[in-house]
Amino acid sequence: MEIIGILIIGAIAGWLGSIIYKGSGLGLLWNIVVGIIGGFIGSWLLGLIGIHLGAGWIGSILTGAIGAIVFLFIINLILKNRK
């Protein structure tokens, strides 16, 4: 059951991050991937500066969305430098 929760939170966080950063969704699979990676990045970054958004679904989604925005920004920088 826990993996289903991680996938749902990852999908929501990735979708929210892609809406805020780019203005459009990436599709369900990529939203899940970006959201899960964003969750790790967000937890790490927010932990460095001492911010905790709470335990539970809402805190996890917000942390994942913040990390997803950072991840999308980094990906965008890499892809712009390739051109």
Image (cartoon, rainbow, N blue to C red):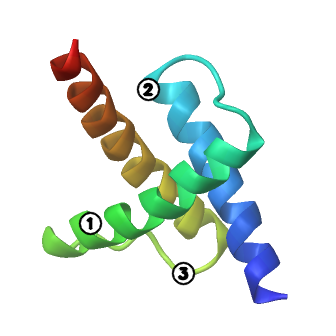
Instruction: Give x and y (percent) for residue 48.
Output: 15, 72
Gap between marks 1 and 2, in whole Å?
A: 18 Å
Residue type for callout 2: Tyr
**Is 46 in front, or is 73?**
73
- Residue depicted at 59% across the width and 51% down the height: 13
The residue beneath circle 3 is 55
Closer mark to the observer between disc 1 and disc 2:
2
| Label 3 crowd (10 A; few <14 / some 14-19 / many >=20) | few
Measure the alpha-carbon separation of dots 3 and 2: 24 Å
Judge whether residue 63 can be spotted in this image.
no
Residue type at mark 1 is Leu
Q: Upstream in the sequence, badge 1 or badge 2?
A: 2
Q: Mark 2: few, some, or many residues within 10 Å (few <14, many ≥20)?
A: some
The residue closer to the viewer here, 47 or 33, is 33
Quadrant containing the N terminus is: bottom right
Whether tag 3 and tag 1 are in contact, CB under 8 A, the answer is: no
Marker disc for residue 21: 2
Dot 3 or dot 2: first in sequence order is 2
Q: Which residue is mark 1?
A: 46
Frontmost of labels 3 and 2 is: 2
Q: For the C terminus, give its image quadrant.
A: top left
